Image (spheres, grey):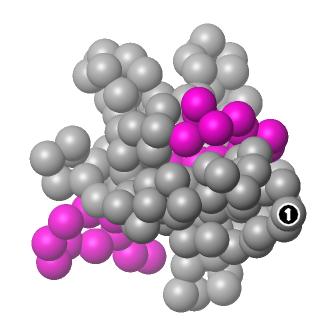
Amino acid sequence: MKHTISILVENHAGVLSRISGLFSRRGFNIDSLAVGVTDDPSVSRVTLVADGDDYMVEQLEKQLNKLVDVIRVRTIPQEELISRELLLVKINAPAEKRSEIMTIAEITGAKVVDITTSTITLEISDRTEKLANFEALIKPYGIKEMVRTGTIALQRGADAIKR
């Protein structure tokens, strides 16, 4: 089962290395990783998605909480999860296919960020599953290049992870 773990850390060099090292030493794979500064520039939020059982996640939380630069650790339950990824994709777009590609972009909420005589570059932000559906729709046109960010996530409702 996929688990989304949100970690507040001191914004210092080497913190990410210690966190990823903890996963590596225990043989757990990180499916997605995103790091960014919060509203407080001295604090960063690390969002990890990892596959494993509840026991594994509980053990990881305990180990993460032992790291010096870790402020807070929270596994966000699936039913309370708001998550997004960003995808940029450059697609082959000959003149006769452009209107089809533009229709797909409009229906899915993707934005055109660049256009040339032979390609269209689109940007879309959504949940992982929606991005997989989008990718399946545009794949037949020929993907020249594609990149995705890691998952970022917040918990629904008024509850917040703060310092």
Q: Is residue 73 visible?
A: no
Residue 108 location, quadrant: bottom left
Answer with left or right where residue 156 lies relative to residue 104: left
- Position of the N terminus, as image quadrant, is top left
Please say whether residue 150 is one of the residues in the magenta stretch.
Answer: yes
Percent position of residue 63, x then y: 50, 34
Please provide percent x and percent y for residue 138: 55, 41
Q: What's the amino acid at mark 1?
A: Thr
Which residues fall within the magenta stretch? Answer: 138-163
Asked if residue 33 lies left or right of residue 154, the reply is right
Residue drawn at point x = 77 percent, y = 69 percent:
115
Residue 65 percent location from the top left of the image: 48, 46
Residue at figure coordinates x 21%, y 44% from the top left: 77
SS at circle 1:
loop
Could you say which is closer to the camera, residue 79 or residue 92? 92
* Above or below: residue 32 compared with residue 116: above
Along the viewing direction, whichever of 78 and 146 lies nearer the viewer: 146
> Residue at the location (47% across, 38% down)?
137
**In the figure, is residue 124 to the left or right of 21?**
left
Seen in the image, is 153 located left or right of residue 21?
left
For residue 124, above or below residue 22? below
Label 1 crowd (10 A; few <14 / some 14-19 / many >=20): few
The percent coordinates of residue 44 (x first, y second) are 61, 69
Q: Quadrant of residue 25?
A: top right
Q: Quadrant of residue 126?
A: bottom left
Check disc 1 and report the residue beneath it. 117
Q: Disc count in the image?
A: 1
Q: Quadrant of the C terminus?
A: bottom left
Please say whether residue 161 is one of the residues in the magenta stretch: yes
- Is residue 83 in sight in this rendering? yes
> Relative to 14, is 62 above or below?
above
